[in-house]
Each structure stands twice: as structure tokens, then as C-alpha cells.
Image (cartoon, rainbow, N blue to C red):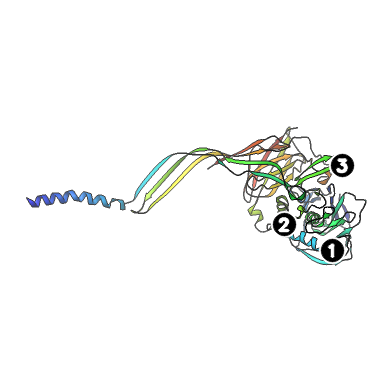
Amino acid sequence: MSFVRSGRSVFSAILIAGMICGHARPALAYLKFGFDLNGRQVTLRWNTMPVRYFVTNQAVAGVSAADFQAAAARAFATWQAVPTAATSYVFGGFTANLPGEDDGRSTLGFLNEPDLDRVLASTNYLVDNATGALLEADIFFNSAFAWSVAANGDRSRWDLESIALHEIGHLNGLGHSAIGETEMTNSGRHVLSTGAIMFPIALGPGDISGRRLDADDIAGISDLYPDNNFNDDTGSLSGRVTKNGRGVFGAHVVAFDPARGDLVANFTLSTNGQFSIAGLQPGPHVIRVEPLDDADIESFFDPAEPVDLNFRTTYYERLVIVPRGGDSGAVQIQVSP
Amino acid sequence: MRVKKAILLAALLVPAVASAQQPREARVEVDGGLHWSGPITFAGVNANEISFGGAPRTVFESSSTLEASAGVEARIGVRLTSILQVESAIALGRTHLATHITADNEAADATITEPVTQ
């Protein structure tokens, strides 16, 4: 969903207790947010660093404003510590303003939204229409849920630092990752495991394992804000997924590094089935292609997009060598219904 | 008569002295042959995700093997001095790097290979 307001576009990405909805269409490269600007794909990103953020001076049960700021600062520090990405953040101070206000300040804080009974937190963007540069990104945390900043977590409360880490990924311009496994139960979709902090479904109250980044997150942020050597030291893998001779849209393509165990992924993002995964360590990779069946499609794509779920999980029959500083060359992967 | 015997002895000794001095000259050795390398199995690496509480959950398991290979080998050595020899060798062989995928709940076991030239 996007609309123009005062010459600026607003996008939103939402973390929900059961799911996350990413309303912006992913760009044709990796898991970055992007949008169409007069027929040109523009990637959503900050053009200047450090990103200055503010925290609403408001407390909820168990979390003071100072606690909130400290947990958010730890989450920002985790992103900033990625050695291959050039991001930095600075705390601007406490503010009486609430997240969601177009005040030119990126603000994090609580809002009580009981109607959003599956939404833990949400990130809203203010974007320069001409360049795609982020101007402001606000994150609200739904105080209708119980929150915790306890060092070891609280089994009855959501860990603020973990959810902040996910939302700050959106603040950076990252979309969702589908590296995770779920199962459907009578009570809805249940998360079994996640392989990226940007997976759209949180594991549950009390879990603090989401305070760390995975290989997919690191590749994503490094691809979006590469440091001087990142593009020279890593490589990419690209190709096409087809079924019965036709391109498959929305296939989840996972690159597995059998030497390190890293999982990094993207989707086929065009109707002819093209995909590209950047930020990979050089060397052989296993490619696994699966339908997008571990989260709601709306968490990744516009509902109108022709996402194909009717094919079997498939391993490409060859190891693909990712060259340092280059691309594997087009890999042709056939899947079957 | 004694003089003649002494000359003959000297003549017999000369070749022996010359032979002892030969290693100081440059000498080139070339040889070649076939070689065979046994398979090399690497430690298995699992594709792990994190479940509630931080415990790893395996999506699939992998193990990789550099398969056995045969090839040719050539070597050249140049003796520069009596104690210094320079050698160079080249070996060429083709094999396959194979990764075996197992324990994937969503897909059958698979063996994925890539030819490797060594």
C-alpha cells in the first residue's frame, strides 16, 4: 500500500503476533523494499548516516521510557555492529511526540492499538518521491500487549529488544525474509523455527533468541549499505525458476553454504521466474526452491501478485559456485507440480 | 721400468678424479606418471534455524565429499649445484564435489554435485 501525501510517499511494514504484512513491493534484488517511480525501480534506503532517532517519553507496565530507550539502543547497536555494513544510529533524545506523526523525526514508542490484536509493532516510512531516500521512519509498539526488557526474558511478555531488532530492520529498508518453518494448527499458524530476524512471525512471549542477527539479515543489510569491501569480498547467485517451461513467480529460493551452514534467500520476483541473491560468501552453494507456504503471502507480496504455490520443494542438481566479487551466471532450475 | 708403471697408474686415476667433479654441472631430470587420490569426506553441516528458546532446529542435513580421482602428474628437476636442486611438478585430475542432502521434511534426499578440476 502506498499513497502520496504532500509530495512524499508513505509505506508501512507491520510485525504482527501471528504475521507481518509488508505492503511495499520488494525490489528486484534481494529482500529490500522498493517501489516503482515512473517506471524505475527505486530501493528504499537512508542516504545519510547516522540515522537520528527519538523515543517517546511514555511508559507502560514493566517498561519505563528509559528501559525502552536502552532496549532500542541495544537493538540499534546490533545492526550497527555488522562489520560488512555501513550503518550508524544516534539517539536524539526523548520526545512528547508519538510515532506516526509527520514531524521529521524518526520516533519509537508505544501506542495502544487494541483493535490490532495480532500486531506487535509497526514501522511507517516517509519517503522522498524523487529519490527513494528515507526521510523519516517511525516504529510503534502496541501497548495492548505485555512487554518486557528483562535480561532473560519473561515468559508472559514479549521481548522488546527482539521485536525492536526486527522493526529496525524495516527502518533500515529491509523487507521480510521467508527463512522459517511454520505449521498450521487449529489455533492458526504456529512458528517452529526462524532463520532470520526478518521472518514475519515472532516466536512467542518470553523468547529472547531474536536478539541476534542471522546470515540472511547480515547479507541483507550489507547489500543495502555495503561497506568498502563488501561487494568485492562476496558474490551473488542468480538465475531463473521455471515450471513446465514457464517462469514461476514468488518461488522462495534459498542458498545454503555447505561449508558454513549459512542460509540466505530471496524470491523469484518477475513472471519469468528470475531471482538474484546477493551478499553470499564465495564458494559452492546448494540451491533449494520451495513454495511460499510458511507465512501469509501478504507478508511479502501484494495480494494481486500471481504467487505460484503449486510446486514441490526442489534441490537444484548442481552445486553453484559463487565467485568472489562476481555472479554465478544464470542458473536454470526446473520445478514440477 | 718403474717410471712407466707410475705413468700408467696416474692415467688410471685421472678418470676417477674427473667423475667426482661431475655433480657440479647442471643436470635436468624429467619424470611423469599417474596418480590416484582417495575420497575426502568433510564434516557434515546442518541447515539450522532457531526455535523457541534458542534451541537449533534442523531443516535438513548435509555432508560433502570430494570423490576419488585419478590423474596425470609431471615433474621436472634442475640440479644447480651439488647441494641445490630446483623442482617443479604439475598434476591434473578431475573429480566431483558432492553434497548429500538428507532429513528434509519437504523434499526427498538428494545428491548435488559439481565437477572439479584439480
The residue nearer to you, when weighing B107 against B87, is B107
* Residue A17, percent from left and from top: 85, 49
Mark 2 highlights which residue? A225
Mark 1 highlights which residue? A55
Q: Nearer the viewer, mark 2 or mark 3?
A: 3
CA gap between label 2 and label 3 equals: 39 Å
* Residue A223, percent from left and from top: 71, 53
Q: Furthest residue to the right?
A: A115
CA gap between label 2 and label 1 equals: 24 Å
Q: Secondary structure at mark 1?
A: strand
- Tell me which numbered mark, 3 or 1, is placed earlier along the sequence: 1
CA gap between label 3 and label 1 equals: 35 Å
Mark 3 highlights which residue? A187
Q: Nearer the viewer, mark 3 or mark 1?
A: 3
Q: Amino acid at mark 3?
A: Ser
| Crowdedness near tag 3: few (<14), some (14–19) or many (≥20) residues, C-alpha within 10 Å | few
| Crowdedness near tag 2: few (<14), some (14–19) or many (≥20) residues, C-alpha within 10 Å | some
Q: Chain of mark 2?
A: A
Q: Residue at x 63, y 53 (%)?
A: A233
Q: Secondary structure at mark 3?
A: loop
The answer to whether residue B83 shows anywhere in this view is yes
Determine whether, in the image, residue B72 is placed left or right of residue A219.
Answer: left
